[in-house]
Amino acid sequence: MTTAILALQGAFAEHGAMLDALGEPWFELRSAADADRGFDRLVLPGGESTVQGKLLREEGLLEPLGCRIRAGMPVLGTCAGLILLARSVVGRGPDGALAEGPGTFSTLGVAVKRNAYGRQLGSFHASAPLDGGAVVPMSFIRAPRIIDRAPDVRCLAEVDGWPVAVQQGSQIAVAFHPELDGDPSIHELFLGL
Ligand code: GLN
């Protein structure tokens, strides 16, 4: 099994370190040529979802990766990665007004609100049980909030009554950065898909 880590922008290197610790082979995916290499899973890292979406289009990656996600390839989206997967995204446009639009891959049945935890003071730590089991640490950095979800989207963890980790079939998405806290639980769940 090999995991591709989308490495166009953002916090991709830390995912590699986590997969190394778990003994999972991986490579950084940057171009359409990389997408032709053999891989079985995909990680979409945190960063800036608007920039990542633009680069995905420019690199011709949106279609091939979207096809594979829709076909059931396991995918882990963290923070901006969650926004890329979401079916609907609420955020501020260039004019500063709130607007709702379709997501980038639009494969995950959730609506998210970008930067919902504030702009300046948007980073914080929390912890919560994962899927009713062990408590995992969570670092939030200008995180999106999952404001709605389809009935078949399972909530794996919540903080302050909001879902922060969800699963729908072979897609797992989290609002926080599981690669930053040294706890492998989310990556283990993903590798077990
Ligand atoms: N605020 C970022 C966005 O909207 C996500 C932040 C993150 O990935 N840490 O894309």
Image (spheres, rainbow, N blue to C red):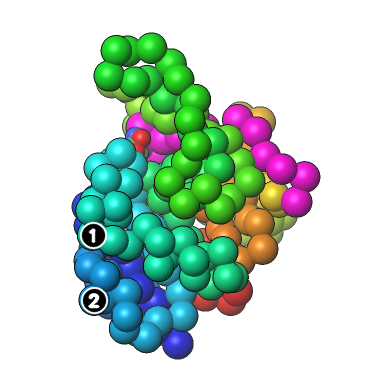
Kindly indicate whether the residue at mark 2 contacts the one at mark 1 (C-beta within 8 angstroms): no
What residue is at 29 percent from the left and 12 percent from the top? 95
What residue is at 54 percent from the left and 36 percent from the top? 88
The circle on residue 185 is: none
**Residue 111 vs residue 181: left or right?**
right
The residue where tag 1 is placed is: 59
How packed is label 1: few (under 14 Cα within 10 Å), some, or many (20 or more)? few
Q: Position of residue 182 (x, y in %)?
A: 38, 61
Mark found first going from the N terminus, 1 or 2? 2
Quadrant the C terminus occupies: bottom right
The residue where tag 2 is placed is: 33
Q: Amino acid at mark 2?
A: Ala
Element carrying mark 2: helix
Q: Position of residue 1 (x, y in %)?
A: 45, 87
What residue is at 23 percent from the left and 53 percent from the top? 58
Front residue of 151/71: it is: 71
How packed is label 2: few (under 14 Cα within 10 Å), some, or many (20 or more)? few
Q: Amino acid at mark 1?
A: Glu
Front residue of 123/170: it is: 170
* Residue stretch rendered in magenta on the structure: 140-152
What residue is at 63 percent from the left and 46 percent from the top? 109
How far apart are the alpha carbons under marks 1 and 2? 10 Å
Is the residue 9 above or below the residue 13 in the image?
Answer: above
Locate ligand 1 by image quadrant: top left
Element carrying mark 1: loop
> Was residue 144 drawn as part of the magenta stretch in this picture?
yes
